[in-house]
Image (cartoon, grey):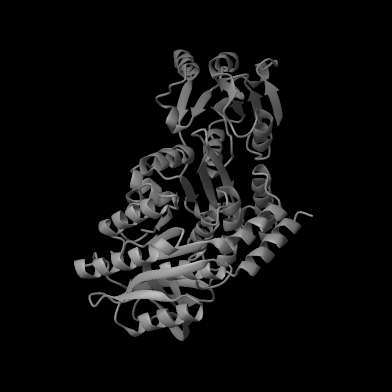
Amino acid sequence: MSILSINNNLTQLRGCVLTYGHFSTIHPGHIRYLNYARSKGTNLVVALKGDKIENNKNIYNYNQKERSEALNSLNIIDDIICLKKNEIDELTKILEPAFLAFGKEFENPEEETIKKAIKLQRLNNRKVIFHAGEIIYSTSELLKGSQNELSQKRNNQFLSSAKRQNLSLSTLQKSLKAWKSAKLLVIGDTIVDQYAACEALGLSAEAPVLVVKELEKKNYIGGAAVVASHIKALGASCEFISIVGDDDTSKYVKDTLLERGIKPVLISDQTRPTTLKKRYVVENQKLFRVSKLEDHNLNKEIEDKLIYEIEEKAPFVNGIVISDFVYGVITKNVLESIKKLSNKYGLLVFGDLQCSSQVGSIIKFKDFSLICPNEKEARIAMQDKDSGLENLSRKLIKITNSENLIMKLGAQGFIAYSKDKKGGFNSQSFPALSVNPIDVAGAGDSLLAVMAVGLSSGEEVMPTATLGCIAASLAVESMGNIPIERNDLELKLQSTFKKNK
């Protein structure tokens, strides 16, 4: 691959597929877009914006040389052409591309050079396409290399992300030490995850149904309860308030939390059971899940009790974490009360709303310090299936007025976004370090816990997100939701940095 300038002789590139952008931080959304563009021809060329295009100031986190090197490492692109500013119209005239490929956000462009490039392309009966790439919620990487190769690749991606944020092992270890100052209150849905280990016996002779023999079962606390458990295990102080049923399952939750050093406030609601999700597993492979739950909103009496307890705890913490599975606990009145308390006491508020099988929307979390949706939840909330990840994330931040955002991408990792002092965004993609996870159910909970602890202790978003990437990789390495100890996190951090030596 060659890195050229617009002043070079470019005639050999005529008829290419031409793409355009600034690519300040490479993330899975860019890779989708570039792979789609590449599928339209044999030669993919990226026109890379210059550093100074607005009021002659550098508006990007990384200069053009750094951005071109990051693109070069992808092994998708054939050539990169470094523009002086944003003269994509001049380059279109020179290259006469067969396809001019833009992201969906450029369908109604404000930049005059883009308008001119599109007009020129269409006047000459050449194609213009607007596409963000195919949306995928899983990965097929294991078909393209061995597990060791993919593990090393992701480890290198992680180290590259840390380097781009000027984060060293010692810097991150220092960040970890600050966590003990965090004091958090966790509110949300309590869940008990039950895993039933089974032996597969075969198909039933009566119908095409898999027959299994249950061997043993084990319970784990999940939902908001495990977020609180993570926070405590990471070395921070934690209070926990939730709604449970009047049943043996709630007693298990209380006993487990007390063993972990958390004194929970569990409000009993006679109209619902403690949520129980039973998963049937054969040799680490989940077959299906059966859920026992009620998801109606709290009645006024229970809601008032919950708000009272939150008001009692709020003056003694520096952050509130909301883990909402949309089972009716986090009502409109509860959110309004939390917002008032946040304003009164200067509290940070962190939110994660999980609605894979429920009806909910992340945009009900307004003015939060951090929200953590996955891509599918964000697209459903925004009613947007076409925008690129960058555009989608920025629109979500704007509509919720969130200070920071974690966009979770499943097997592709996540992207962290943080507002800077100039009103722009610092963003960084982090890979999913575990290539072949055992149980992905707890990754988001551990990530939310780390982000809340880190930011509440005064640490910045990017070092905290880097540590969150490590925590998520630990969370998926065992069956069931197990709290991550700070010492284990530090050991994993050290080994990840040492793999590159």
Quadrant of the rendering where the C terminus is positioned: bottom right
Quadrant of the rendering where the N terminus is positioned: top right
Residue at point 46%, 28% (across, down): 129
* Percent x, y of residue 231: 51, 66
Does residue 454 appear to the left or right of 127 in the view shown? right
Looking at the image, residue 157 lies above or below residue 476: above
Identify the residue at the far right of this view: 501
Q: Kindly indicate the quadrant of the structure image that contains residue 3.
A: top right
* Percent x, y of residue 155: 67, 54
* Percent x, y of residue 240: 41, 70
Residue at point 33%, 43% (across, down): 383
Question: Between 189 and 180, which is closer to the camera in this rendering?
Answer: 180
Looking at the image, residue 434 lies above or below residue 5: below
Does residue 134 appear to the left or right of 81 in the view shown? left
Does residue 418 appear to the left or right of 153 in the view shown? left
* Percent x, y of residue 293: 30, 72
Question: Between 52 and 374, which is closer to the camera in this rendering?
Answer: 52
Question: Between 286 and 275, which is closer to the camera in this rendering?
Answer: 275
Residue at point 61%, 51% (across, down): 463
Residue 104 in sight in this render: yes
Looking at the image, residue 142 lies above or below residue 196: above
Residue at point 55%, 27% (across, down): 20
Identify the residue at the far left of this view: 300
Q: Kindly indicate the quadrant of the structure image that contains residue 403.
A: top left
Residue 278 in sight in this render: no
